[in-house]
Image (cartoon, rainbow, N blue to C red):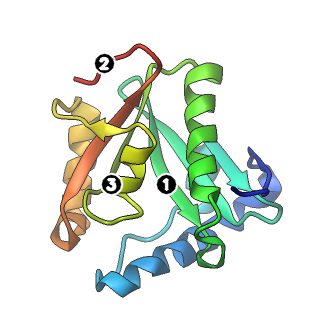
Amino acid sequence: MSTVPIRRATGADLHLLPALEALADTVFDTLGFGALPAPGTVEAFAGARLVLVAGDPPVGLARLEEVDGFAHLEQLSVHPEHHGRGIGGELLEAAFHEAVAVLGYPAMTLCTFADVAWNGPFYVRHGFEPLETLTPGLRRLQEKERAEGLEAMGRRVVMIRRAAGGKAT
């Protein structure tokens, strides 16, 4: 497991995060995906519901937004040189804990590639499951992804992980 500390992002971190996200997205080049949507802006990170980072300077990030009363994992990124060290899983678990135990959300949702090993299968290992009935906000996110060309790159899935005792719908 990782020994990189995970913490809430500070104002000093924000200008580093778009480049970190863009660099992390380069792992998709090996799949022939082509250009992914542009990374989040400094303003998007500053306005997020929560941003956690791993390391100082950050080598990983988790950005949460709110969609229809759920925490929504908008982005999980790890610098390619730090892959395979457990940082992504630790960031995901920390973000889920913050969302449920600290911020009081009943669940966390996300949209991801269903068949990419470090996407769909990774999230399943961390307790997420496909969400069949989408809220209006999640449907809008799917439409946005479709417009950005993500569905053309691979099968997409909306997933949910509920707080202990909750059931997916």
Task: Left or right? Give the position of 22 relative to 5.
Answer: left
Query: Which quarter of the rendering shows the N terminus?
Result: bottom right
Point 24% across, 50% down: residue: 157
Per the rendering, the mark at residue 167 is 2
Q: Position of residue 25 (x, y in %)?
A: 47, 74
Q: Position of residue 164 (x, y in %)?
A: 47, 18
Q: Is residue 43 visible?
A: no
Mark closest to the chain's N terminus, 1 or 3: 1
In the picture of the structure, the residue carrying the numbered disc 3 is: 120
| Mark 1 closeness class: few <14, some 14–19, many ≥20 residues within 10 Å | some
Where on the picture, by quarter, is residue 162?
Answer: top left
Q: In what element is the residue under mark 2?
A: loop
- The label nearer to you, 1 versus 2, is 2
| Mark 3 closeness class: few <14, some 14–19, many ≥20 residues within 10 Å | many
Point 45% across, 49% down: residue: 74
Per the rendering, the mark at residue 75 is 1
At label 2, the amino acid type is Lys
- Closer-to-camera residue (68/43): 68
Q: CA distance from mark 1 to mark 2?
A: 24 Å
At label 1, the amino acid type is Gln
In this rendering, is residue 101 above or below 81? above
| Mark 2 closeness class: few <14, some 14–19, many ≥20 residues within 10 Å | few
- Closer-to-camera residue (100/41): 100
